[in-house]
Image: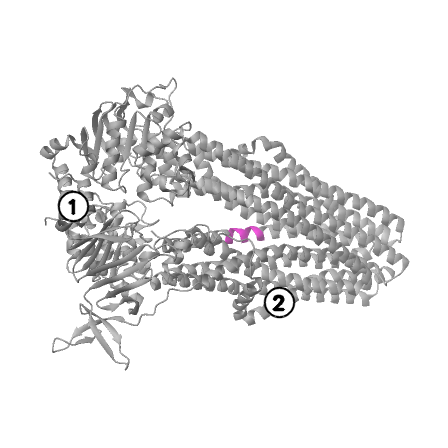
Amino acid sequence: MPPMPRGMGATKPKSKNAGKTLKRILGYLMQYKLRLLGMVVCIIASAYAAAKSSLFLKTLIDDYITPMLVEKTPDLMAGLIRAILLLGVVFLVGVVCTFLYNRIMIPVGQGILKKVRDEMFAKMETLPIRYFDVNSHGDIMSHYTNDTDTLRQLITMTVPQLVNSVVSVVVLLVSMLSISFWMTLLTLAFTALNLFISGKTGGLSGKYFITQQRQLGDLNGYIEEMINGQKVVKVFNHEQDIVETFDKKNTALRGSAQKAFFISNLVMPIIMSIGYLQYVALAVAGAAMAIAGVGGVTLGGIVSFLQLSKSFNRPIDMMSQQISAIVMALAGAERIFELMDQEPEQDGGTVKLVRAKYDRDGETLLETDELTNIWAWRKQNEDGSYSYRRLVGDIVLNHVDFGYNDKKQILYDINIQADAGQKIAFVGHTGAGKTTITNLLNRFYDIQGGTITYDGIDITHICKSDLRRSLGVVLQDVNLFTGTVMENIRYGRLDATDEECIAAAQLANADNFIRLLPQGYDTVLSGDGAGLSQGQRQLIAIARAAVADPPVMILDEATSSIDTRTESIVQKGMDSLMYGRTVFVIAHRLSTVQNSDVIMVIDGGHIIERGNHDKLIAEKGQYYRLYTGAFELE
Amino acid sequence: MIKRLAAFVGENKKDALLTPVFVCLECVFEVLIPFLMANIIDKGVIVGDFGYTVKMGLVLALFAVLSVCCGISAARFSTNAASGFASNLRGALFHKVQEFSFSNIDKFSTSSIITRLTTDINNIMQAFVALLRIATRAPLMMIVSLVFAFSVNARLATIYLCAVPVLGVFVYCMFRKTFPMFQKVFKAYDGLNEVVQENLTGIRVVKSYVREEHEVNKFNKASNAIYTLFVKAERVMSFNMPGMQLAMYGCQILICWFGANMIVSHTMTTGQLSSIIAYSGMILASLMMLSMVLVMVSMAEASAKRAIEILDEQSDIVSPELAVTLVPDGSITFENVAFSYSGRADKNVLAGVNLEIKSGQTIGILGGTGSGKSTLVQMIPRLYDATEGTVKVGGINVKDYDVQALRDAVAMVLQKNELFSGTIKENLRWGNAEATDEEIIEACKLAQADEFVATMPDGYDTMIERGGTNVSGGQKQRLCIARALIKKPKILILDDSTSAVDTATEAAIREGFRSFIPDTTKLIIAQRISSVRDCDAIVVLDEGAISGIGTHDELMANNKIYREVYYSQQKGGED
């Protein structure tokens, strides 16, 4: 079993390379240049309309109301109507622009997300098995959930809001300056205070949030572990102890949650109050200036300014809130890009697997599109011509050394010769290296020393996908996919007909139980085939391999969960499945491997015994001891 | 449902009730402030009364401070109430699950229980916080704003009275339209995650069959579905903001026009105009908040339903009153026992089982997958209750025992066994918290675990990782057997617990049982004949019924199934 270092991809709160990540996100955004341009224009228009609504008060009061209070002329009245109509047009444009920029951004945000998701998954599929060994599934999964979600928020919400905020701030600042420089300065002073306080509380609550998040993770982890082991808990009457530990963790979480939420909830009321104080200060200052007649402040100017200063606070608060969203999204995006930047599985192979037929002379192989049952390895010669060799299934391991890393060697000097059609078995303790050997055949891992050849061709020269297509694998842990039983069997060969799938199921003795399922072959399996017994799952996996019909098969504890009586029934199917193929079998049950052509006893990464059943029994070595441990021969 | 959940506010009731009070006070101040501001403008700024401006400014500042005090108190009380509520609810669910019997657990499935305890609780808490603060704040804010707007100028304020219902209907329609759309989006997300999850666990299969492209196509389809649904939902959503703006701008234009006319005809002042416009912002904000709460609450509704399902589940296995607390010996009797899983009464897993096991006997149980072996033994410590007939331990019906006493006397090693994060020693002490180190080592020797534990870097203090991933299958099984042995039980049940242990080691374990715990009744479920061959009696199960009982030789002579199993394990080389 490969080593599984845990927590390698643990979530890092901060991004290491924010600049580069941002650039990459911008790269995605830049594919929508026109839409982005449209968005900015619309946002400016919409922000202008919003500012206009406050500025209009000044016009209304100073240009119309105040003069009209003195004397109501028809001229003024007509002017007022015109002004209001104009305002209406501005507003209407504003509303339309708000609508437009919301609309414009939809395909951008969702499009980028789809692209990122698709690219990430396509990339993931090319990664070597090692990547999946080293990174926990939960961590990889979170790239698709949490990290993509923060990215979604960044693109669909934060970016437009940020643009909106910046534009609003600029427009409002200009508007305020147009009324009074000194009052604007006073407003900015309050804004600074505002930012200072929200920054302080933000930092503090951030600290508590991290504690809270950690404790929540801890508690949820505990819940998960205990509920998963709930039946054991019951068998051992351990409910009370569990509850005590749970209560402790639960109380701790409550405390930290209280602190974190309290502080973050403080920000709003404080900021609002500062807003009121600002309003008061501006009113007093404005009044003083108006009375003293400095700075050309008019009554309408004050009223407008008060309104503007209120609007000014909102985008500023928003921007400060968005900063944390940006930091989070960058960290998430960085993790996504990290996955995308992983080295994909290397494939230096050039030898391809092609359908072939014999020439009229019956000796030369020719490539063909016909559905023959003959396959051939096609090798390109130096002069560009092709040479063919028939696929038969000879596999030779020559002085093979292997370790998952440099520190620990797993296999030492493994020599195996499997002739086409032979059945080779591996016997040994868990961790002896049996499964590892089979993982080398299909190049899930590359060897450090020695060579492996397939029909005389070094497997590193064979195109990986063709190599794997020529090897069928049935593993102990069966993985089924969501879909019907039929689809799961067809996974072995996508163009297999229903009849072929059913024939394969019959061969694996799976047909009987499948027909008893509620919808037979059309029964939808979900949750990795939950509802089926482990044995039934193994039967489906065998059928799946049978449909694929490869010349070489690897059966890694393929029948371990099938009871021996059923196994003996399946055995016939298995035998016909194995007939004419090179088969590598790994099994605990010696009965499964007894009839092999060669049995290899593996211990500590070495082949310590080899030979057929009778020979090994006669040798009275490890195999003999294992065998007699199982049956005391009478 | 709300009533049920409200009970979990518990000791935080005071906090929960005080929150809206302070929220209300905060609102009142917030609304009062624009009201006073009108005065500052009219009586201070316009008239040029600087003294008045300062005086009212100070009053306003005082109000602002009071408002912030109320805000802080509301924050304090609401967070207390919410975190207390979440903690109580989570605790109640977890405690409830601890009472669950096996069939209760089966009914919900493990993963669903975990989701209810984590994600669902979180959703409920967020909705609760929102309800406490925003649900009181938003409507109140709206009402108070309207009242003040009316008191400032009733005629002008009627504009709001027209606009609010229109906006309300608009927000509600948007919600009704988009909510199911977003739910569909979430479902589509589940579909996508499923593909990823299956590829993570099945990556070896995918690569072996060279199905990367096939999987990428599957993923793209799921990904496309999300894209389409999301775009559709967001298209509808994009009417939200402009709709609100339209309403607000419309109000403003009307107010400007009529306001200007009223000021000119001296029925209103300039200050009042600016206050009325200020209220428009508040009314709009409160409407937006309301729509947000609406979304949150409806999302939490499904979560709340699921949490309550757990709370409402009745554990079907409880100790009787006046329970027997001492198990006299390890004898076991099954009388006409039948069993079917609840909800599938039509199909009996076991039927007509009669069995008599004497204290100290070793009994093997053999049978194919699904023959009912595990179910049979799980009725002994009352993990499941027999649907018909009685199961007796020590001559007493298991239903008459105190459940804890019964389970202490019956140790069971489950087929799907778990070790927990912690040291090996801590894991073993699950069997008996007071076990001495010597007792632990002794049990491990018996389970043939001592040898490999001793070679581990920290011996018995080696940390087991979550799920026991750092020990092999066979090692895990042996540790689980040792854990059961430490209980010093009267009955020991091994449910296919040595399947990953090699045959020689397994034989050593059996030999240990024979010589060191001869008085313990031992039930061994196994696949291999060799595992049960030496038993005092072997029970052969087939499709939920006993097909034969006897020693190896007897069964070889008169039980066809047993013979078949035997030969299936014997032959292999011969043919």
Which residue occupies the foreground of this view, B552 or B280? B552
In the figure, B537 relative to B166: above or below?
above
Residue at screen point 71% across, 65% down: A85
User: Is label 2 on the same chain as label 1?
Assistant: yes
Q: Which residue is mark 1?
A: A620
Q: Is residue B176 magenta?
A: yes
Question: Mark 2 belongs to which amino acid?
Answer: Cys
Which residue occupies the foreground of this view, A285 or A127? A127
Instruction: Give me the disc on residue B38.
Output: none
- x, y percentage for residue A179? 80, 63
The residue mark sitting in front, 2 or 1, is 1
Q: Which quarter of the image is occupied by the C terminus of chain A? A: top left
Q: Is residue A44 magenta?
A: no
Residue at screen point 61% across, 52% down: B167
User: Is the residue marked by circle 2 packed among few (<14), some (14-19), or many (20+) residues within 10 Å?
Assistant: many
- x, y percentage for residue A348? 34, 70
* Chain ID of residue with mark 1: A
* Magenta span: B170-178
User: Is the residue marked by circle 1 packed among few (<14), some (14-19), or many (20+) residues within 10 Å?
Assistant: few
Residue A13 can be seen in this image? yes
Q: What kind of colouring is applied to the model shown?
A: one colour
- x, y percentage for residue A573? 16, 52
Tag 2's secondary structure?
helix
Q: Residue furthest bottom?
A: A383
- x, y percentage for residue B13? 60, 32
Q: Which residue is mark 2?
A: A42
* Chain ID of residue with mark 2: A
- Alpha-carbon distance for marks 2 and 1? 87 Å
Question: Mark 1 belongs to which amino acid?
Answer: Lys
